[in-house]
Image (tube, grey):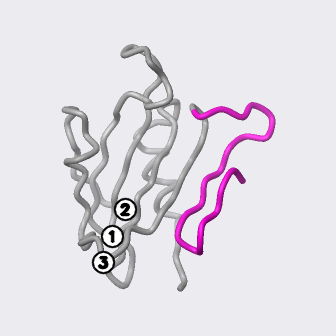
């Protein structure tokens, strides 16, 4: 585990090869900020946003350059926002070495109990 914040955010990173390029992060977006549905427009960096389904609920997925690299052709990362039961929105980040389907499969396993 790399970080944990107030029962709303968790970041996992490899013990054997720790780096920003191989982290997975899951956060619950706050309703007070107006996050009531998936909306990746501010994160897409001009990349196409795909409408997806995560565990039967709507979501948005985009592949963007990894912010930890100054190289525009460097590593990429996935960003996903998806609805959770109860109307909360999941913000999920995963390394670009994962496939599209792997990202959706992992995100479908994320649960939240307040």
Q: Earlier in the sequence, mark 2 or mark 3?
A: 3
Q: Specify the quadrant of the image occupied by residue 46.
A: top left
Report the span colored magenta. Answer: 1-20
Helix, strand or loop for disc 2: strand
Q: Which mark is residue 83?
A: 1
Helix, strand or loop for disc 1: strand
The location of residue 66, given as percent across then percent down, is: 44, 30
User: On the rendered structure, is 33 left or right of 92?
Assistant: left
Q: Which residue is mark 3?
A: 32
Alpha carbon separation for disc pair 1 and 3: 16 Å
Q: Earlier in the sequence, mark 1 or mark 2?
A: 2
**Compared with residue 85, is residue 110 higher up or lower down, i.e. above or below?**
above
> Are the two marked residues, 1 and 3, in contact with CB atoms closer than 8 angstroms?
no
In this rendered view, identify the residue nearer to me: 38 or 97: 38
User: On the rendered structure, is 101 left or right of 81?
Assistant: right
Residue 16 magenta-highlighted: yes
The location of residue 85, given as percent across then percent down, is: 38, 80
In this rendered view, identify the residue nearer to me: 75 or 102: 75
- How busy is the neighbourhood of tag 1: few (under 14 within 10 Å), some, or many (20 plus)? many
- How busy is the neighbourhood of tag 3: few (under 14 within 10 Å), some, or many (20 plus)? few
Q: Main secondary structure of the magenta part?
A: loop
Q: Which mark is residue 54?
A: 2
């Amino acid at each position: 585990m790399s970080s944990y914040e107030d029962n709303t955010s968790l970041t996992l990173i490899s013990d054997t090869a720790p780096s920003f390029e191989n982290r997975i992060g899951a956060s619950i977006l706050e309703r007070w900020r107006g996050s009531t549905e998936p909306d990746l427009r501010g994160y897409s960096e001009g990349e196409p946003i795909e409408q997806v389904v995560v565990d039967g609920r709507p979501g948005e997925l985009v592949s963007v350059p990894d912010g930890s690299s100054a190289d525009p052709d460097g590593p990429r990362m996935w960003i996903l926002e998806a609805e959770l039961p109860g109307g909360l929105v999941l913000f999920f980040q995963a390394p670009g070495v994962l496939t599209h389907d792997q990202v959706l499969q992992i995100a479908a396993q994320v649960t939240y109990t307040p």
